[in-house]
Amino acid sequence: MNDTVHPSAEVPDALKRILLIPFDHLNAERGVLRDAQPETDLVLFVQSERMCSGRNWHKERLFFLISSARHFAKRLEGMGFTVWFVKAETTAAGITHTREQLGDLPVVCAQPSSIRQSAQLQEIGVEFVDNDFFLTPRTLFRTWAESQKTFVMENFYRAQRIRLDLLVKDGEPEQGRWNFDADNRLPPPKNYTWPERLEHQRDALDDEVATSLNYTPTTTWATTREGALSQLEHFLEHHLAGFGPLEDAVTLEEWSLHHSLLSPYLNNGLITPDEVVAQAIERYDAGEAPIQSVEAFVRQIIGWREYINGMYWFLGADYRELNTLGAERPLLPVFTNSGATKMNCVKQVVSQVEKRAWTHHIPRLMILSNLALVTGTNPQQFLDWMRERFIDAAEWVMVPNIIGMGVHADGGRLMTKPYAAGGAYINKMTQYCKGCAYDPKKRVGDDACPFTTLYWDFLDRHTAEFVKNHRMARQVHGLGRLTDLPELRERATHVLAGLDEGTI
Ligand SMILES: Cc1cc2nc3c(=O)[nH]c(=O)nc-3n(C[C@H](O)[C@H](O)[C@H](O)COP(=O)(O)OP(=O)(O)OC[C@H]3O[C@@H](n4cnc5c(N)ncnc54)[C@H](O)[C@@H]3O)c2cc1C
Ligand code: SF4
């Protein structure tokens, strides 16, 4: 199947290069388009069949990626470029097909964002220019990582603040502290009015893509740079000030709280991390947002986001396959069907993902990853599921977030201790427990919270690994003081069987 959707104007007479634009490089000022010339360059997009139907992709995600690329292609045409949008079996087949028609010209692309795609494109002779969609060149990150004993994100973040000269005066952090999280981490507020959320209306091109996918998209995600910029403006105006304090809370009333909803556009290139950070700091300078919110937001972008990308490249291809806790349980039915559980927190979060392919970082960590971790779900099956279901998923961001942060499958290379939580903590940070069939305080008995039971059972199953970890000493010690361990083990066996059957 090779199909060229819209070969725009004539091919340039003086054609010298084919510029390949992956669907996450949608920016006219970055990557290979930085020095592109309409007179000598032809811009090529390849929509690969494997990308669309090779896996159980969420259609919201496919719609977003394809429609954003189609809109961007149209924009480049408006700028005078000759654009070919080719549908082919694979990206390699699309490039070969284009070369057959245009001659054996150099194909140039910005360094791809995944190890696998880099290898595939290199194999067919695609040339790379620097990837400037991040603030930290891969070589610079490697130099930092090689100088560290442990890869603590906070240390990287402080170095970034100084290197990028953000919220720093004379080498000292703004308002005397590097990190204001002690003022954040508030539980869900009571009687709080959440600002209106921005909806993105669909245009004719969106409709065409939606029809081709036989799907009705939400109005949550924009598919153009203008839409992404309006989302940024909406966040700065209505949410930035409240971002920090409520960053870790989860409420029943409002699914996005004060989160920015910017990750899809940062990840596909429609907006860039430097412009987002600069605008947030402008609001701080203008006295429109407090330091604990602006610092927290800046840390997510120049700290976490850059750190995760840097670590992905630093840790290399084998990291994806790690499974040091030997977790072999197949993916639980609840991940593919929110109806297959009575656990209110899991049901609500999975149904959010079913609806709009997004939930914020705490449900990703505290509910979804925690469930995979304490049930001993196979990390690669869980990773694949997250990759397929999230609007902002990409290999570089999912691999360290899941293998390292989410399910501790890397033996602690990224995070020194696993993020396992029982029902009591979930009850503190969310409002799910009130409407649940289970009791977060109980670890045994028919109405015991599965998270509470499995938290202890997880520690029990892995005592040998964790007893050597001084950061886990308190938890392991707590396990030793349980008087109902035999009963708890029995309940855990029952809970795991029920989760496998979709009845718990
Ligand atoms: C298990 C797990 C899986 C995740 N998978 C992804 C993923 O596939 N794609 C993705 O973009 N983010 C991922 N994240 C990070 C984070 O959950 C999302 O970036 C965030 O929820 C996106 O919503 P937002 O734009 O409203 O973020 P906000 O809360 O408004 O944060 C602002 C920005 O900070 C960046 N950011 C914050 N934390 C991280 C992080 N840990 N890694 C990378 N960027 C970060 C994102 O670009 C985000 O847009 C994951 C986190 C966890 C714990
Ligand atoms: S009681 Fe347990 S299962 Fe139910 S919502 Fe709370 S944490 Fe989730």
Image (cartoon, rainbow, N blue to C red):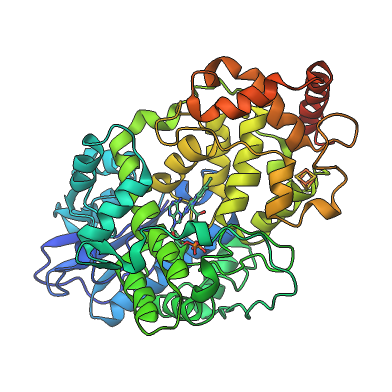
Label total for image: 0
Q: Give the residue at x 76% y 27%.
A: 496
Question: Quick check: 176 above or below 366?
Answer: below
Q: Give the residue at x 62% y 51%.
A: 363
**Residue 356: image location, x then y, percent:** 63, 62
200 sits to left or right of 416? right
User: Quick one: quadrant of the C terminus?
Assistant: top right
Question: Quick check: 504 above or below 367?
Answer: above
**Residue 456: image location, x then y, percent:** 70, 27
Question: Quick check: 123 above or below 256?
Answer: above
Q: Give the residue at x 46% y 67%.
A: 292
Residue 351 visible in image: yes
Residue closer to the observer: 419 or 189: 189
Residue 443 falls in which quadrant of the image?
top right
85 sits to left or right of 344? left
Residue 125 falls in which quadrant of the image?
top left
438 sits to left or right of 132? right
**Residue 317: image location, x then y, percent:** 34, 32
Q: Give the residue at x 58% y 37%.
A: 382
Q: Residue furthest right?
A: 446
Q: Residue furthest front?
A: 176
**Residue 49: image location, x then y, percent:** 46, 50
Residue 336 visible in image: no
Question: Quick check: 167 above or below 229?
Answer: above
Residue closer to the observer: 396 or 239: 239
